[in-house]
Image: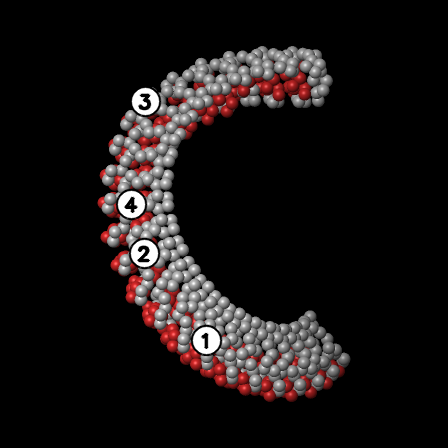
Amino acid sequence: MIAAENGHTKTVQILLKYGADVTKKDVFNRQPIHFAFSGRQIEIAKLLLENKADPSAVDKWKETPLMVAARDGDAQSTELLLEHGADVSMRDENLWSALHYATTSGHHQIMKLLLENKADPSAVDKWKKTPLMVAASDGDAQSTELLLEHGADVSMRDENHWTALHYATTSGHHKIMKLLLENKADPSAVDKWKKTPLMKATRAGDARFTELLLEHGADVSQRDENHSTALHYATTSGDHQIMKLLLENKADPSAADKWKKTPLMVAARAGDARFTELLLEHGADVSQRDENHWTALHYATTSGHHQIMKLLLENKADPSAVDKWKKTPLIVAASDGDAQSTELLFEHGADVSQRDENHWTALHYATRSGHLQIMKLLLENKADPNAVDKWEKTPLMVAARDGDAQSTELLFEHGADVSQRDENHWTALHYATTSGHHQIIKLLLENKADPNAVDKLKKTALMVAARDSDVQSTELLLEHGADVSQRDENHWTALHYATRSCHHQITKLLLENKADPNAVDTWKKTPLMVAARYGDAQSTELLLEHGADVSQRDEDHWTALHYNTRSGHQQTMKLLLENKADPNAVDKWKKTPLMVVARDGDAQSTELLLEHGADVSQRDEDHRTALHYATASGHHQIMELLLVNEADPNAVNEWKRTPLIVAARNFQSTELLLEHGADVSQKDEDHSTALHYATRSGHRQITKLLLENKADPNAVDKWKRTPLMVAARDGDAQSTELLLEHGANISPRNKSNSTDLQRGDCVCL
């Protein structure tokens, strides 16, 4: 193989003399003859063929020496192989024949040789392409002619149903197209997508091709899979000559595609005045609508093509035609800010009062976009400045919301009603306030907007400003008579909103304007409670300075001090206590502020309350003291504070539980309570002692501590169970041993007359 490829003729001769195998293959199935032809070693190739080398041998890719020679344009090799019987019909892995290779390389002499040796001019490859398609695609007229002379079939189609004519048209080869058409190629053949050569020619903007196809009977009415005609394609390409040709050949100017678009719509959208004119001259229907009910006028308007709009309007296009969403060309022009289009439409009778599906007028759209010139045009043409949309919004509300002072002023000049309300009862003033547009707020108020108008939820503009922490808006509204005492549906005042937003300047403004610091909402909450809950010391101080009552209670009997303890803000708490807030006030459930902070583990607040006389002995509705709460939560620092302040370590709750019984799971809490005199012998309503609880929970360290503090190991509960029985039942060997060491009686019996030790998992004797 090496000798054959490198042209070592003598070496090949010697090897052949000594019986070298001419059919031997390498890893790619190539034989010596493949190497000889790929290296154009004719003498060696001849030697190999004379020594029985296979002229049709195939390699790994099914390529034969004939294919190699055809691809390389080697006529001498091709002739030699054919003389030795090379098979012209063989195909490679892509089903290409030697003729495909010769055609794609444009080797006419080899093509002629192959065809004279019966090569099939209509053989198809893997993608169903014939040599004729290859030649047409490559623009090779000589190859095309040669193939046609040898009977190539012009009607054959590839996997996409393309014919040779489709390829020639797409590639722009005029001479080949002519050859194919003269040989009966179908000018109306459709591909997989139902496209004809005529459509391809018109899309490419090739007038010569279009003319040629029409001369040979191409059908102008054919449609592709999207129902587009050649005229649709011509309109897209922008070639006036082609469009004229098609129209002169009876192309329908009103043909609609899949989306009901006509060539006129396409031309209008593209802004092609000459096309539009041509289509109109040939009877295009200006009233046709696409699937969204758009007319050509809608398209021309949205694209801002004034010359086309004028043409369409002069040809009776309806300036008030509505689309699927009830939008007119006037609405489109107003939305896009196109003054010239707006003017044109008015000149031709556009109706300014028409509304879209949301009841928006052209004026709503112009206002939203801030197009003053268009707004002015619309208003001068009797547009209603008080027209309401689906949600009862007026153009004035839109301008106020968007902060457009000039639009607001213009609407006022034309009689806009400042008192109108939307479906939520919002006025333009509500919109301006929520957006924080001070100039517009001022304009509205100067034009008699009611500063006390309430919305659906009874909110005023003042409440909105207070909620949004807008000082300037608050000031403006107060200057124009806003009522500080008004309440929303939850009975909140502007002061409640200002306090919740922690905005001190607004709180101050409202109080200086006689806002009631003791106003209560639906739940009887005052602004002071709101400030206390959020820990706002500055607002709290302001409210107290203006007479806020620290003793007021909400529906759950919470005071401002209760709210403050929940949020843990000491500065606010100090202010309240210094202003005589009762540290012992009880809520609906008889909880005091001290209980709340004890439960939440707030040591600083606990200390502050104790300093101001909080009573450690008070009990809630379940008879729990602050010490019960601190113990249950495991807050040792607070427990110590309470015990130092004479909290009773033996106080019992509704279930007769003492803090020691509650603490029986927490060693540090138990130790602390014992140090302050907790009684180990006290029993709850089930007669269980702290030792019962410690044993039941398996806390050996606590069990030991209680026993060392004289807890009775033989105390019996309601069911006559001793701590020893509990430990035995739970299989707790260590606790059992501890109890026995401290004198637990092994023999007592429970109500079922068993010792429980008899049933225990361990007996430690």
Which sits earlier in the primary sequence, circle 4 or circle 2? 2
Q: Nearer the viewer, mark 1 or mark 3?
A: 1
Q: Nearer the viewer, mark 4 or mark 2?
A: 4
Which sits earlier in the primary sequence, circle 3 or circle 4? 4
Callout 2 amino acid: Leu
Whether residues under marks 3 and 4 lie with C-beta atoms below 8 angstroms apart, the answer is no
Residue at figure coordinates x 58%, y 19% from the top left: 702
Determine whether the residue tagged by mark 2 lies in a helix, strand or loop.
Answer: helix
Q: Which quarter shows the N terminus?
A: bottom right
Crowd class of label 1 (few under 14; some 14 to 19; many from 20; radius 10 Å)? many
Mark 4 = which residue? 419
Residues 764 and 206: in front is 206
Mark 3 = which residue? 579
Mark 1 = which residue? 252
C-alpha span from label 1 to label 3: 91 Å
Mark 2 = which residue? 363
Which sits earlier in the primary sequence, circle 2 or circle 3? 2
Q: Which quarter shows the C terminus?
A: top right
Q: Nearer the viewer, mark 3 or mark 4?
A: 4
Residues 54 and 103: in front is 103
Which sits earlier in the primary sequence, circle 4 or circle 1? 1
Residue at figure coordinates x 36%, y 49% from the top left: 392
Crowd class of label 2 (few under 14; some 14 to 19; many from 20; radius 10 Å)? many
Determine whether the residue tagged by mark 1 lies in a helix, strand or loop.
Answer: loop
Determine whether the residue tagged by mark 3 lies in a helix, strand or loop.
Answer: loop
